[in-house]
């Protein structure tokens, strides 16, 4: 689980109409801005564990995206319900990604805690994610951009709060993020293909 974050980043509330569409637009903008020609493979790292309801956001998204992106040649998903990426194997997973893929552009995804009025908001930001900061764990940062979903309020008894997070909220958030990434990445790759065609 990620650190408690502010509301200053680009965000979408899952309760708003067309939330997945709004998120995909922001996601596409971030890809166009930060996914430059220096990168080759694109890796989506979904962090969390299915042993905690609140912290299962990442594995749920990974589970949904893994089946979709199998047909893509240079898009890879790490962190699923069957093979989660969590505190105990995070460093090994990061090492594997940078050892196995060519100039990877990493999108890190994780649940987080925040202010009560921001619960249900999805944030996307540039730069690495700091997993575990919300529960005082010292874990390596990861990601060229990162996506976080505020699944509950923070400030005290974080582990208990995560365990008592509503699955309904986490599932709705996972649906919104996975749908937004699926469409956003398809659209972004279509745009890149058209740009390359114009150069020929």
Image: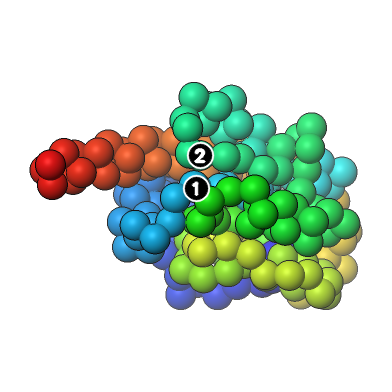
Label 1 crowding class (10 Å Cα cut-off): few <14, some 14-19, many 20+? some
Across and down, in percent, residue 179 comes to 47, 35
Q: Residue at x 63, y 57 (%)?
A: 98
Across and down, in percent, residue 71 comes to 49, 24
Question: Which residue has dot 1 on it?
Answer: 42
Q: Residue at x 61, y 40 (%)?
A: 77
Q: Quadrant of residue 170?
A: top right
Across and down, in percent, residue 4 comes to 66, 72
Q: Quadrant of residue 106?
A: bottom right
Across and down, in percent, residue 59 comes to 71, 41
- Alpha-carbon span between mark 2 and mark 1: 5 Å
Tell me whether circle 2 and circle 1 mark residues in contact (CB < 8 Å). yes
Q: Residue at x 79, y 32 (%)?
A: 82
Q: Nearer the viewer, residue 152 or 40?
A: 40
Indicate the quadrant containing the C terminus: top left, top right, bottom left or bottom right: top left
Q: Could one spot residue 191 in this view of the protein?
A: no
């Amino acid at each position: 689980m990620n650190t408690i974050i502010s509301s200053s980043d680009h965000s979408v509330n899952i309760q708003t109409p067309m939330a997945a569409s709004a998120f995909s637009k922001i996601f596409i903008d971030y890809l166009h801005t930060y996914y430059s020609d220096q990168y080759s493979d694109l890796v989506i790292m979904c962090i969390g564990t299915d042993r905690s309801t609140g912290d299962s956001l990442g594995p749920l998204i990974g589970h949904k995206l893994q089946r979709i992106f199998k047909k893509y040649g240079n898009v890879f998903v790490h962190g699923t319900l069957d093979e989660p990426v969590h505190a105990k194997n995070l460093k090994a997973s990061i090492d594997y990604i940078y050892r196995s893929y060519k100039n990877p552009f990493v999108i890190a995804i994780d649940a987080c805690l925040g202010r009560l009025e921001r619960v249900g908001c999805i944030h996307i930001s540039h730069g690495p994610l700091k997993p575990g900061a919300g529960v005082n764990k010292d874990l390596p940062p990861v990601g060229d951009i990162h996506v976080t979903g505020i699944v509950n309020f923070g400030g005290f008894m974080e582990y208990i709060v995560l365990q008592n997070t509503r699955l309904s909220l986490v599932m709705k958030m996972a649906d919104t993020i996975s749908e937004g990434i699926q469409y956003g990445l398809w659209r972004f790759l279509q745009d890149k293909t058209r740009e390359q065609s114009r150069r020929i």
